[in-house]
Amino acid sequence: MKYAFIESCRGDYPVNLMCRVLGLSRPGYYAWRTREPSKQAKRRESIGQRLEALYHCFRRRYGARRLTVELNDEGIACSENYVADVMRERGLKALNGKGFRYQRRVESMTQVKENVLGRNFSSEAPNRKWVADITYIKVGRSWAYLAVVLDLFSRKIVGWSLESHMRESLVLEALEMALQRRAYTDGLLLHSDRGVQYRGNEYQQWLRDLCFVPSMSRKGNCWERAACPRGVTR
């Protein structure tokens, strides 16, 4: 995803500078540009995305055996061992069984920011205050996830990303679009909830690099991000 970000900004910033900021090597970036993913890798990525969507659709209760049945019913031929392997790669584990112990990710217990916005949803000028959120959209038997970034001055969506997963890359892509479309300055306030995506290491590093001011709603308090439109259908 970082290499793709560099590729999209090549006309605006030097490749050398972007690689240095993102902690990547220039040879690695140029190798990525010329490397064509294998047919097997493309198939594995496609199955992985669908598998992850099903995993969240069934509220993370299905393991490899039941998800294999779902995939095969959809015409995606794969074995239980193959599904189990992909699940391990993506960190997916069924939340059931007597031996199950839920352990929260490190980011879910750290990197919580104070509520700087404080329900002050007005802004004196564009690109001073942005609000970010994720919306769940029911699509047939599965879910789609829409991450948005809204400017509180105009109440317009300045960045968005729609995917079949809720990984941290979802909110990064929405923020990336906003950065490309708007002229921002140091000190921009970016408010969100306490979702693990917004507490992720890479997302928080982006905010530090951009000199943005992070702000988060208090736990279980949806009114503190009420300005961001939500069309959740559960």
Image (tube, rainbow, N blue to C red):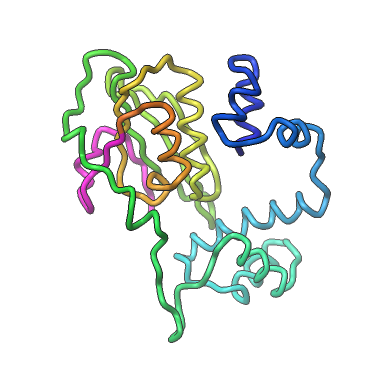
In the displayed structure, 127 sits above or below 159; it is above
Query: Is residue 190 part of the magenta span, yes or no?
Result: no
In the displayed structure, 124 sits above or below 49; it is above
Residue at the image point whose x is 53% and y is 63% from the top: 55
Label the magenta part by its dominant secondary structure: loop
User: Between 26 and 90, which is closer to the camera in this rendering?
Assistant: 26
Residue at the image point whose x is 45% and y is 46% from the top: 201
Q: Position of residue 20 (x, y in %)?
A: 59, 29
Farthest bottom residue? Answer: 98
Is 28 displayed left or right of 174 in the figure? right
Residue at the image point whose x is 27% and y is 13% from the top: 125
In the displayed structure, 92 sits above or below 113; it is below
Residue at the image point whose x is 50% and y is 72% from the top: 94
Q: Position of residue 38 (x, y in %)?
A: 83, 48
Query: Is residue 221 part of the magenta span, yes or no?
Result: yes
Query: Start and end of the magenta stretch?
Result: 214-234
Quadrant containing the C terminus in the rendered view? bottom left
User: Between 111 and 219, which is closer to the camera in this rendering?
Assistant: 111
Q: Position of residue 1 (x, y in %)?
A: 61, 39
Q: How many marks?
A: 0
Is 128 displayed left or right of 205 in the figure? left
- Identify the image quadrant of residue 115: top left
Q: Position of residue 181 (x, y in %)?
A: 48, 18
User: Between 3 and 228, which is closer to the camera in this rendering?
Assistant: 3
- Identify the image quadrant of residue 214: top left
